[in-house]
Image: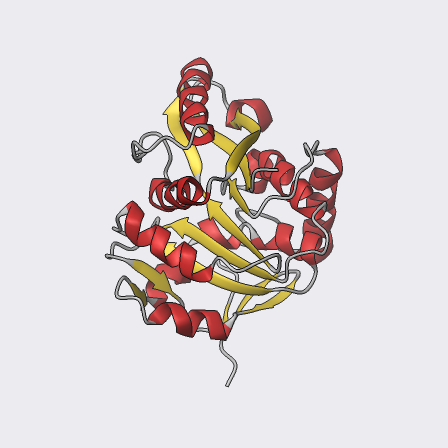
Amino acid sequence: MTSVRPAAVAGSFYPAHPQTLGRLVDLMLHDAHPKGGKPHALIVPHAGLIYSGPIAATAYAQLARVQPRPTRVVLLGPSHHVGFTGLALPDCTAFETPLGSVPIDRATVEKLRALPQVRSVAKAHAKEHSLEVQLPFLQRVLGEFTLVPLVVGEATPGEVAEVIEAAWGGAETVVLVSSDLSHFHSWAQARELDHETAERIVALDSRPLDGEEACGCGPVNGLLEVARRRGLVCTPLDVRNSGDTAGDRSRVVGYGAFAFEERS
């Protein structure tokens, strides 16, 4: 039986009308400037599209260059509404956006359920935007794909890394971590703070980031542990904030897009 997790933030974080949404995403992808390479993992921001969309589009334009295109997306983001321990899977078989339905990769989901830190927490997914706002970009760039959606609660970097490793896969898979950077500083302060955070991400720093540096610090720290183990190279694609896109410069949110790939 098919059960669908309906779009929760259509009409607020992004347009609810399919054609309007498609045009907006396509325009952002067109205006993005990818840097080449074939990333196996990406960090992307997750605010409303008018704020973080141009930065996220840089990562998705990068993904659009990967051939053959990935057919499975492992997507991890922080919990904004529900507190819990471990990593949460949904109890549905598909996620819906105005652009259509994205099926869950049931085989991978069942594999991950065997890990002690992974469990089903439907409430963690019901209103969560950190995963949902990535889907319209993925739908435009990849077309058809399956999804492994994980909301990260209280979990150690090692626990998150174990889940990412279990779902890593080959060329058919891309791992996405959804995270914004600093919150509610002035434009100048955010630029300085986010530059420091970006340097640590690019360096694959073993010191864990905290919630003041990145709201998705849990999944980011897990991905960085995997990147260190696998000897990946991280490339910064775009680091800006809401004061650069559509917001007031007195109180901004920071955004960063980063690509991870194997050493050539």
- The mark total stands at 0
Could you tell me which residue is drawn at 69 percent across and 38 percent down?
Answer: 28
Q: Is residue 74 left or right of residue 112?
A: right
Q: In this view, does 248 lie above or below 43?
A: above
Could you tell me which residue is drawn at 32 percent across and 33 percent down?
Answer: 206
Could you tell me which residue is drawn at 47 percent across and 46 percent down?
Answer: 177
Viewer-proximal residue among 207 and 106: 207
Viewer-proximal residue among 67 and 250: 67
Q: In this view, does 254 lie above or below 2?
A: above
Colour setup of the view: secondary structure
Viewer-proximal residue among 50 and 198: 198
Residue 170: percent from the left, percent from the top? Answer: 57, 58
Q: In this view, does 100 lie to the left or right of 255?
A: right
Query: Furthest residue to the front?
Result: 264
Residue 161: percent from the left, percent from the top? Answer: 36, 51
Q: In which quarter of the image is residue 259?
A: top right
The quadrant of the picture occupied by the C terminus is: top right
Q: In this view, does 111 lie above or below 221?
A: below
**Is residue 91 something one can see in this rendering?**
no
Q: In this view, does 223 lie above or below 174?
A: above
Query: Furthest residue to the top?
Result: 188
Viewer-proximal residue among 28 and 76: 76
Residue 102: percent from the left, percent from the top? Answer: 59, 66
**Is residue 190 something one can see in this rendering?**
yes
Residue 13: percent from the left, percent from the top? Answer: 53, 46
Q: In this view, does 62 lie to the left or right of 182?
A: right
Q: Quadrant of residue 207?
A: top left
Could you tell me which residue is drawn at 65 percent across and 43 percent down?
Answer: 38
